[in-house]
Image (spheres, coloured by chain):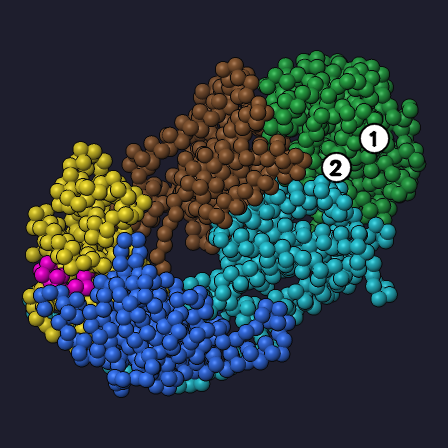
Amino acid sequence: MELFLQQVVSGISTGAIYACMALAVVMIYQAIHHLNFAQGEMAMFSTYIAWQLMAWGLPWGLALPLAVILSFFGGFAIERIVFKPIQNAPVLSHIVIFIALFSIFNSLAGFIWDFTIKSVASPFGEGPFMGSTLLGKHQAGMIAVTLVMLAMLWAFFQFTRVGLAMRAAAANPESARLVGIRVETMTALGWGMASAIGAVAGILIAPVVFLEPNMMLSILLYGFAGAVLGGLTNPLGAVVGGFLVGIIENLAGTYLGDVGAELKLSIALALIIVVLVMKPEGLFGRKIVQRV
Amino acid sequence: MTDIAHTDHRNPGLTAPAYRPADAPRRRLLSGGNIVTLLVLALLISIPIYSKGFFVFQMTQMLVYAIAVLGLNLLTGINGQFSLGHSAFYAIGAYTCAILVELGGVNYMLTIPIAGIVAFGFGFLFAFPALRLEGLYLALATFALAVATPQLLKLHAIEQWTGGVQGIVMFQDTFDVPVPFGLDMDPGVWTFYLTLFVFAVVYVLAMALVKSRTGRAMMAIRDNPIAARSMGISLPYYKATAFGVSALVTGIAGALNAIVIKFVAPDSFTFFFAILILVGMVIGGVGWLQGCLIGGLAMLYLPNIAEIFDNVVLWFAGLFGFADLLPSGNALQQQFIRLSGVIYGVILVLFIYVAPSGAGGLIRAIVSRVKRLTS
Amino acid sequence: MSALLKVENLTASYGELQVLRDMSFEVEQGGVTTLLGANGAGKTTTLRAICGMVRRSGRIVLDGQDISRRATEDIVRLGVAHVPDGRGTFTTLTTEENLHLGAMARPNNKAEIEADIQKCFEFFPRLKERRNQQAGTLSGGEQQMLAIARALMLRPKLMLLDEPSFGLAPLITRQIFDILADLTKETGTSMLVVEQNASLALELADHAYLIETGSIVMSGSSAAVREDESVRASYLGY
Amino acid sequence: MELMRTKLMAACAVLAISTTAAAAGTTVKIGSTNAYSGPASAYGQIGQTSAACFNWANDNKILGEDTIEFIPLDDGYSPPKTVEQTRKLVERDEVVLTFQQLGTPTNSAIHKYMNAKKVPHLFLATGASKWGDPENFPWTMGWQPPYPTEGEIYGKYLIANKPDAKVAILYQNDDYGKDYLNGFKKGLGDKADEMIVAETPYEVADPTVDSAIISFKSSGADTFFNIATPKFAAQAIRKADEIGWKPLHFLNSVSNSVGAVLKPAGLEASQDIISSGYLMDPTDPEWQDHPEFKDWLAFMDKYYPDGDKTSSFTVLGWASCQTMLDVLKRAEGDYSRDNIMEKAASIHELRVPLLLPGILIDTSPTDYYPIEAEQLMRFTGEGWERFGDIISAESE
Amino acid sequence: MLITDGPTPVISIQDITVQFGGIVALDAVEFDIREGEILGLIGPNGAGKTTLFNCLSRLYTPTDGDIAFLGNSILGLPANKIAGLGIGRTFQNVACFANLSVRDNVRIGAHSDSRSDPLSDALRLPWVRREEQKIDAVTADLLGWLDLGDVAELPVGGLPFGTQKRVELARALASDPKLLLLDEPACGLNHDEVQELETIIRRIRDERGVTVLLVEHHMSLVMSVSDRVVVLNFGRKIAEGTPEEVQKNPDVVAAYLGDGH
């Protein structure tokens, strides 16, 4: 029973990693209705920027916000420079651009900072959280930041004019134009925000998995899985989905014997496919009814 | 403005359509397309005559990749279903071949069709859950398949057949592919011709399929599923068939890959390879099967294009006289190799800028412009 | 009377398909103008062309300003509110959020916007009851009301209304047209109305144009048009 | 196609230049593949160091008038790509030998090919045991101590010092992990089944190994064998410390770099870890004044300034490159493949820079394991403290 | 030509009701289409015409009622079996296969009339070739018949709207249907094209013996080409009869022109 509890808590703390990333995935999905394969690499690159700023002697209280802001403008610029010129190209060409961005960021990070792991200090300090052996301070901090980010996102979309405009632009671009919303700007803004959220996620994840150019490779996949499981249109669902994926993966690895340990990723993925087949809109997603 | 102004824009004189019987479809032997096809075929056949072992080997690889691109294109380009998981079917083909040859003692040439059939089975079965998924969700499900493939291949329980993480080394005793029929031929050249033959057969059959009733039904589903249903086309049947056929072709490519490389291991079939096939297909042109050779070339050369960048830069440096500023020895090449991912990515972005619909779209645009200019 | 909107030689197409051919017409300041015509005649396209939502050529002048090359959102910012066919409701957002969106092109003056929302609720008490409901769950009539109210939130110079009666029961249609009549009287907003229901439209409008296959075939005062036989012919086929 | 032709022309041009240069001496072409892209790119530093080392050798005329042309290619750690790139090296560039190719699955893919082509396939950057099989594969030779040997050393140490240990093992689910695991079990002998209480594989694609460490703690294990690559090894060390699990910790030498593993994991947390080594650790104060170490630093500053001077990869690159240079020197201008292989298989008690004192390289036509000795060491919190004798499989 | 008392109804619509959520799109609608007639179905926007149409082609399933084709209910069949029965259709905003050539679009229309399987197709077995020849002959005939010969090899997506509509007609006729459902064929056509369409619809009935159900807004077309007209409003049938009868029906006038007339 103690093992079970430990694995669940540990699942929650790895789940927090996925949840962070899933939040960024949902953000970009809202803006462009795509899964951005380069999202993880963008987050990794942002984390390197934060790390570099700290290595140059900036305190983390300055370095982290600065990295997040730089990431925001970076995301905004990517939309403007890379995607705007090809906005009418077929979907698959966009996917190829995602792959290209993935490759560029991964390789560039390795070129600049090389491929050995770097430790990133946790802003929340180290050691157990409130004397618990189950949860570290960083894990607790990470879960808290994820939830705060979720709340902030919710408030942004619910109570601000720009948030409302972004929702409108995503829901119905044509009508959005008809009320005077600059839809293209909203899309770029979505990129910027997704990139900024990704940066926060990266900075939170790096102390757990260590910073290196490939650190997001599998985390992004789990992030996708969490987002899809929870429903791509629902930030809360995505966060819950992320936690669920973490827990499922841990329990499968612990209780399904050798096969479970060898295949825990596959089992988690298979489960997600099953959910999708049963409920294509995700556990918490809204079903969109279409009339023919 | 109170008076009523009548303005009539109607054209006088009605033209009812005249009944002119249309010709049956014209099948000219010497059409532009056929000439190009023959030229390419001649070029391919002559490769071993004017080039050495390594280039022949590379071209063999290219043909294998081209078959894989063709397979994916049958699913995505013809039927409109996404897949980021074709490395899985490729792996199934490769392992089927390797296991049958090494453990079953089956003739390697025979394993090629068997690998195709096995892959067809997997593809057809995978299609059933996939039928419920569309677009993005299907892409994600297939991506999951690609990610899980190396893990499944390493699985302890099937290690006695798959060789686990060690994989399977093929042609243990002879080392090289045995050349049949007592032919006095270099095994590399023989493998090339075998691959070319399989490629040609697969290509011809795929073209025939696309131009047949089945192919039309698949394309109809891609263009407009609702209208397709109204034409009496069963969506589940044709979507599953497309998945199966696509897996079959990709599985054949996998089997050939095993024969060419003579080694299969889980690390050969990661999701990176699935993405590589996808990139190859987009570069060749989605829905344009002829583009598979261009896709194969892209898969072969693009990932390592950085290797020649130092030559390019040195050439420019010589031209503009800044050679002294460059690092000496192979330091420059080293830097470019470290940047290979950046170079690959930038080239992809530039390519999509120039040809948003791949080489196929570009070629069609050029051909139609030339036609317009000449007519 | 001066023209608020002047359209000259408007041509528009969807890809290869040319839908409008050399159309010229005007909307007068403070007046209601209607475009009549059978389905597919090009009424909707005309409105979309004014708003820059289809490829168009020709001259479109709003209040002395040439808008024929402007982007949709800029035209809206100049005070043109378009109530599209199918109403263009943001179905996943609430009624109140839809209204807020209507004011998106205005400066962000919270008090003024709040006051205007209250005014909208006075015009359409049904919307007040449904203010926190998702717009997609409203009935057709309510959605039409919402679409009109959302347009009003812009404090527009010109409202473009595309088939306000679409899919509504006669009683509701009647209600909506009554409200539109009140509105133009009270606020002095100019309107360009596209409508299938000729009798309703002619009742509301001062001036009417009749379109057939992308060209204007007739124009005149509502009263004059109402009496003309060709209207009947183009609608009922005799 | 066009691209191909320019490339061929460029190759011809290079060839032309090298033949004119041949008046002064011969050019020895050496090829290599490494993971410069993809998930294993961290190892790229090894190849980078070698490339720099050959530049150094040319500048310092280590081979007299003869020069080395080193051609490193990227295979992204994908076996089919390794085959392609190796064939490019052998058949197009016509290299005399390949050196220090990286990875077990990648080298497995070309194992047969190199031996069929009779091209020296030397000093591979992988410690799998299969590279020392002169009978079947006379053209392939490893360099590092084989993984199973090292695993066996830990096993034997455990039997001798803590026979009642309850052992938990974390291993990477591939050739490398399994080699270590098997060697370790061999070292434990009959008691293996009894002593091992938990054995968990992880995948390179896993984000963390935290869950395995938690299970280990609750399994009651008091000894931990950490067979993981640097990132996961560091995660395991930190997680164990975090949850207060303090086992007797064996860390495989692949990940015993202070700079690249222990420091990120936390020096405190790494206290008392046992590992074994055969190379000097560049962060160990003990070596800072050693002449070989100073030479290496000077080399790094001049020829590979971007290189990581705290990483064991750059040390390994330098030491194995020196081994290669020794073989070439002894070839005395006869760079035929047969001669090179013969010289590679007759290294006698060679000392190359940066090996731990007392460790020598020895090969013979029947012994294709150049380094078979290692020394156990314990982490003090600052550096490695070696203890006990040099343990050599050869001496048994 | 007016058939007041045809032999058997080709299709008989019996008390069809369709509800979407709370909205009643069709309310107990009932009428027959007799063999060889052109039946016009009209009504203002939102009257339920397209909904009825989609019931006939089995894209929707009615909440209540039955639809019988030649005496047998079709409600148990999936949409893709309808074409095989002999019911062809066109779509309101043209639903051609945009990337395919005109000829291929028409060939697809013949899908339900042939039996090939993927394997035989890929191998081009002799019997498949014979089948293809048959399809090609039918296609060539239709292309000529509808004056599409010049554009036969062009992708449909780039053709003028009016031509696309003709392609759709050809496609619907390729399966040699007994009944043809036309969903607003005049929508988006210019005046000349509507005139052409009128001729074509007559010829479809007269020369090919196909019964036609015409849903249309374009009144002059409906009134001149139909044998009988059924009028829907708000999901209910408000009139049925000859064009003359319907035009004089006060309910119909009110539905179209408003109460004022």
What chain is colored yellow? Answer: C
- Front label number (2 vs 1): 2
What chain is colored brown? Answer: A
The segment highlighted magenta reads C194-208
Q: Residue at x 64, y 72 (%)?
A: E123
Specify whether B15 is left or right of C32. Answer: right
Mark 2 and mark 1 lie on one chain; the one further toward the N terminus is 2
Residue D70: x, y in percent? 76, 39
Specify whether D271 is left or right of B238. Answer: right
Type of the residue with mark 1: Thr
Residue B212: x, y in percent? 56, 71
Q: Secondary structure at mark 1?
A: helix
- Residue B333's disc number: none
Number of residues whose C-alpha sits closer than 10 Å to that of mark 1, classed few (under 14), some (14–19) or many (20 or more): many
What chain is colored green? Answer: D
Q: Is circle 2 on the same chain as circle 1?
A: yes
Can the viewer see residue D37?
no
Type of the residue with mark 2: Asp
Q: Which residue is mark 2?
A: D175
